[in-house]
Image (cartoon, rainbow, N blue to C red):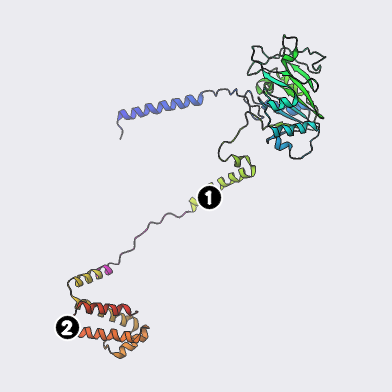
Amino acid sequence: MLDKRSRNILYIFGGVLLLILITEISRPVPINWMPSYTADDKIPFGSYVFFEELEEALGTGSVERIESDPYVFLSEGQERINTSYIFINDYLDFDERQLGQILHYVESGNTVFMSANYFGSRVEDTLGFYAEIVYDQTTPTFNAELDPEFFSPAFKADTSLTFNKGVRKTVFTRIDTLMTRALGYYQSEAQNKVESLNFIEVTYGKGKFLINTLPEAFSNYYMLQPQHAYTANLISFIPSADQVYWDSYLKSGKRIVTSPMRYVFNQDPLRWAYYLLIVGLILYVIFRAKREQRIIEVVKPLENSSVDFTRTIGQMYFQHRDYGNIIAKKINYFLEIVRSKFYLDSSVLDEAFAEKLALKSGNNAEKTKKLIRSINHLKAKAMHSEADLLELNKLLEDFRT
């Protein structure tokens, strides 16, 4: 039983814990500004809004989310013509196998749209450009006046569209002018617009790459502001296609299972089998608990005290060397078995009795006669020794009753 002082301390401690719990629950969740660009994320730099509007913006009836590796998807062997593949992330660093399949896909007459701050050396070396992040204090702004000799006159931007939150200003510092067409640039005071070039078209085989360095424009944060007009202009360069693929694999915000069950959870059949197993085990435990019989208490059987009593009496007689008494009791016990089991009269223990007993009990006739002769001898004897007792005991043990 706690005293009053201890109870007060416990009450105070519990009140402090409750106050901390209420404070944590009521505290507003901090905004997650990390780049994600996934179609399901509604955080500022997720792409939920853009993906929801993508079909209408492109004027196509089919946008398919690709959850698998681009190499796996494009190497399935299906012929794809007049389609587009959209990659948007803060960085896109294709490995050799992925890039090989993407190049073959574009070469066949399809379009790949990429928007990132970093593209990796493989893509840059293959397509003949170099992009780098410019660490200056200028705010990315887009100029409406484009040079018709070098920049695409089809691109129209609003000079009021500025991107100043979470943006890393990335520009193309080198391009291959034989296969590249410049489409857009950051507003700059410099005369050479290439210094702020951020949107290009690279022809490759029968298809083309559309490469942009401002993935932030596709985020929820800017899609819900006037800057969405710039994003709409970027998308307008994607040609009309029969099918558009949206990459959901190369995303910074992709949810990855890190448990040892990762492989199981990544395979639909195995994942559902695992869920069914868990549900089955739960149902088994519930119904098993209801059907399980209550534990029956173990009741010890009553002890046969007569056996212990007989053993005690026998030990007492043996310790006092009262062999005659023990011999008499053994003979009486044996004859009682003969009368009750074999229904023989034991008043006369002669040769005829021994033959009947051997016949009914199935024992050897000679051994039976020897036992009866020994019993008659011991009954007639006045004094008995330990040897007499041991010999009688051996004869009785050899006789099968």
* Snapshot quadrant of residue 44: top right
**Residue type pointed to by label 2:** Ala
**Residue type pointed to by label 1:** Tyr
SS at circle 1:
helix
Residue hosting label 1: 284
- For label 1, the crowd category at 10 Å Cα-Cα, with few meaning under 14, some 14 to 19 and many 20 or more, is few
The chief SS type of the magenta part is loop
Q: Is residue 300 magenta?
A: yes
Residue positioned 62% across, 44% down in the render = 270
**Residue 24 or residue 266, whichever sits in front:** 266
Q: Position of residue 298 (x, y in %)?
A: 37, 58
Marks 1 and 2: in contact by CB < 8 Å?
no
- Per the rendered image, the range of residues in magenta is 292-309
- For label 2, the crowd category at 10 Å Cα-Cα, with few meaning under 14, some 14 to 19 and many 20 or more, is few
Residue hosting label 2: 382
Horizontal side of residue 118 vs 109, given as left or right: left
**Residue 291 or residue 87, whichever sits in front:** 87
* Snapshot quadrant of residue 110: top right
Mark yes or no: residue 370 visible. Answer: yes
Q: Position of residue 257 (x, y in %)?
A: 58, 36
Horizontal side of residue 354 vs 81, given as left or right: left
Q: Is residue 328 magenta?
A: no
SS at circle 2:
loop
Residue positioned 28% across, 89% down in the render = 350
Horizontal side of residue 287 vs 9, given as left or right: right
Q: Position of residue 241 (x, y in %)?
A: 80, 30
Which part of the image, by quadrant, shows the N terminus?
top left
Which part of the image, by quadrant, shows the C terminus?
bottom left
